[in-house]
Amino acid sequence: RISSVSLRRVLDSRGNATVEADVLTDAGGFGRAAAPSGASTGEFEAIELPAQEAIANAREHAVPRLVDTVYAGDQRAVDNALRAADGTDDFSEIGANSAVAISMAAAKAGADTLGAPLYQHLGGAFRGDNFPIPLGNVVGGGEHAKDATDIQEFLSAPVGAPSVEEAVFANAAVHAAIGDIFDERDIGAGKGDEGAWAPPIDDEEAFEIVDEAVSQVADEVGFEIKFGLDMAAAEMYENGAYQYSDGEKSTDEQIEYVADLVEEYDLAYVEDPLDENDYEAFAELTEQVGDQTLICGDDLFVTNVSRLQDGIDANAANSILIKPNQIGSLSDTFDAIELAVENGYETIISHRSGETEDTTIAHLAVATDADYIKTGTVAGERTAKLNELIRIADDAV
Ligand code: PGA
Ligand code: ZN
């Protein structure tokens, strides 16, 4: 059983405070996890409280319900206790940041008690042996960098990589190749919150450069690399239209624009191409190009089974981004993954733009046989997950 839960404030990659949890068990198990944090958060996400407040509230309400009561390996019991302690639908009392940190730390303590790696504990003995393809953010702007592209993320997608390791290095090579092209063109680019290049260029030039870098690296490595986008379109949607630096697009124009991009660049992936409230427009785009590319809901679904069910009913997409902190517990996260898989949706396990060295999502992606993992390319808090993925594939965790 859980013998103690300690909570503290630690730094995230943006320099903000986030919640870290340590869970200990009677049997000597130990687990530690930290909550990530979004910048382009969805309207329907569970609520992140200021770290100090989340910690104080979780100490008062959640910790007493866990200690000496619940087994760390019994994830449903842990997460039910968190839900009961909170008493709201969106973790606004104890904070989704406290909830997710405790939920993940308990899973790690449960795994440690059993002497199993986390992916094995979460995935079980009948887990498949597929590895997720890493989607690597290489160029971006939006809410993650000022004076850069309108589109939030351009993502390298090494779809033909023979191994996780080669896929991880291919994404790093694409990031480097883009840096070289910027040098040649005399473009001075900074970096955004996730370590992607944040160049002062328009989207059209970014498409051209990413396309060139991806083909160059694909030639070098000898397997297929495509690319994709996170448009985070809810952030652009204002006054009934999508706001770009060079003017606005109506919903119909946005659908046509995205469908044309899918054709022109053979995009592997398009996340949040439309506003988070517009299931209908999502469905229209999915009908047009859903057999050629992944249309993925992030802000649309927020890892929430009821929003996902609405999307399934509306044929709104064909894939879902999974972020445990959007919903606040691993049990809820697993429920969303299960519903997605049952309905033929592909799953993409994802980091947030604010991260720590925590590697839980690498284990979650392997445990659930996810199709993709989106966890950046070269920044340290991103390589923490990518390197853990390489270790898991090498059976070295
Ligand atoms: P966020 O961005 O973590 O700032 O929400 C990542 C994403 O939109 O996928
Ligand atoms: Zn997104």
Image (cartoon, rainbow, N blue to C red):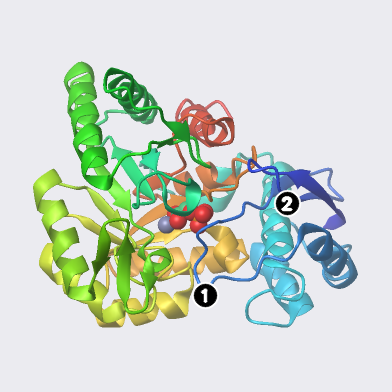
Element type where label 2 sits in the image: strand
Q: Position of residue 218 (x, y in %)?
A: 20, 25
**What residue sits 41% from the left and 30% below the top?**
189
Q: Is residue 174 above or below residue 256?
A: above
- Asked if the residue at tag 2 contacts the one at tag 1, i.e. Cβ–Cβ closer than 8 Å, the answer is no
Residue 18: numbered disc: 2
Q: On the image, numbered disc 1 is attached to which residue?
A: 44
**Front one among 261 and 29:** 261
Is ligand 1 less than 8 Å from the beta carbon at label 2?
Answer: no
Q: Is residue 85 shown above or below 363?
A: below
Residue 332 in the image, given as x and y percentages of width and height = 56, 69
Label 1 or label 2, whichever comes before in sequence order: 2
Q: Which residue type carries mark 1?
A: Phe
User: How far is the residue under mark 1 from the one under mark 2?
Assistant: 20 Å
| Residue 45, position as x, y percentages in the image | 55, 70
In the image: residue 151, left or right of residue 225? right
Quarter assignment of residue 93: bottom right
